[in-house]
Image (cartoon, rainbow, N blue to C red):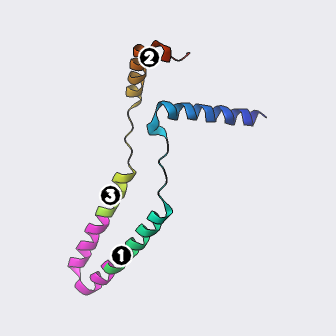
Amino acid sequence: MATNDTRRQFDEIVAGLTADYPSLARRRPRPRWLVVTAAIAGGVVWALLSVAMVAWGAIAVATSCVVVATTVAGIFIDSYRWRPSPTSWARTARRRDRAAPENRRNR
């Protein structure tokens, strides 16, 4: 019984935080067709780069390294989420409270 109450309280706290700070909410998952298409395209590109490395040697190895580095950088940049610092959250909350007294939370 206490576990259910604790879980409910936790869910309420998380819902309140994500309502106040949308950047905390999870990102929507990518559509399955997009993931499958990207995986197939990545496999084909990797196969072509592998053949090129055998056929052309060092130039193709360098090209493969550039392609892999660019892909990793793109994935990292895409997955990175900017989150404001906790102090800026506090400043935003204080500004909001001063602007509209009815928004003040009971503390």
Residue pointed to by mark 3: 74
x then y, percent, for residue 9: 66, 31
Instruction: Point out which mark residue 93 bears.
Output: none
| Label 3: element kind | helix
**How far separated are the C-alphas under marks 1 and 3?**
16 Å
Residue underneath mark 1: 46
Q: Which mark is residue 97?
A: 2
Residue positioned 49% across, 14% down in the render:
102
Residue type for callout 2: Asp
Q: Could you tell me which residue is drawn at 39 percent across and 15 percent down?
A: 99
Q: Earlier in the sequence, mark 2 or mark 3?
A: 3
First in residue order: circle 1 vs circle 3: 1
17 left or right, relative to 37: right
Residue 7 is drawn in which quadrant?
top right
Residue at x 62%, y 36% (from the top left corner): 11
Mark 3 crowdedness (10 Å alpha carbons): few <14, some 14-19, many ≥20: few
Quick one: 51 or 37, which is closer to the camera?
37
Q: Nearer the viewer, residue 59 or 106?
A: 106
Please, what is the dominant secondary structure of the magenta stretch?
helix
Whether residue 83 is in magenta: the answer is no
* Horizontal and vertical percent position of residue 26: 49, 45
